Amino acid sequence: MRNFIIVAASVAFLASGAAAIAAEQADGTVSSVNASTSTLSLRTGQTFLSQDGRQLLRILPVQRLGIMTNETDGVGTYNPTPVRDENGNV
């Protein structure tokens, strides 16, 4: 029974890593945002669908963004070029 529990825990751990690998990541300049259809498009032609269009209300065209998306969490954005201090720390 103990071996079964260890194997089951290992499988669950590996499955969670597979979900993280399935995430899509891109960065670029926003070409259009449509909160009513929950879509965000980059100048590269990539289009992302958000689960909730309200998340896109603060994003403007011409903004440079990093975008991460996966099936469970939807779309998330980040700054692809964060400001660094004189020591190089973010």
Image: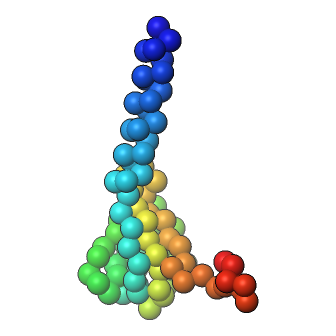
Question: Picture coordinates of residue 21 (x, y %)?
Answer: 37, 53
Is 21 on the left or on the right of 3, as rendered?
Answer: left
Is 52 on the left or on the right of 40, as rendered?
Answer: right
Residue ranking furthest to the top: 1
Question: Picture coordinates of residue 7 (x, y %)?
Answer: 42, 22
Q: Inspect this view and state whether residue 37 appears.
A: no
Question: Picture coordinates of residue 9 (x, y %)?
Answer: 47, 27
**Between 30 and 85, the one nearer to me in the picture:** 85
Residue at 49% of width from left, 65% of height from top? 76
Residue ranking furthest to the left: 45
Residue at 41% of width from left, 38% of height from top? 14
Q: With respect to residue 18, does 3 lie above or below? A: above
Residue at 42% of width from left, 51% of height from top? 20
**Between 18 and 58, the one nearer to me in the picture:** 18
Residue ranking furthest to the right: 86
Image color mode: rainbow
Instruction: Name the image quarter holding residue 41.
Output: bottom left
Q: With respect to residue 42, does 12 lie above or below? A: above
In the picture, the quarter occupied by the C terminus is: bottom right
Instruction: Name the image quarter holding residue 24.
Output: bottom left
Question: Picture coordinates of residue 64 (x, y %)?
Answer: 47, 86
Numbered circles on residues, count: 0
Q: Inspect this view and state whether residue 42 appears.
A: yes
Instruction: Name the image quarter holding residue 51.
Output: bottom left
Residue at 47% of width from left, 8% of height from top? 1
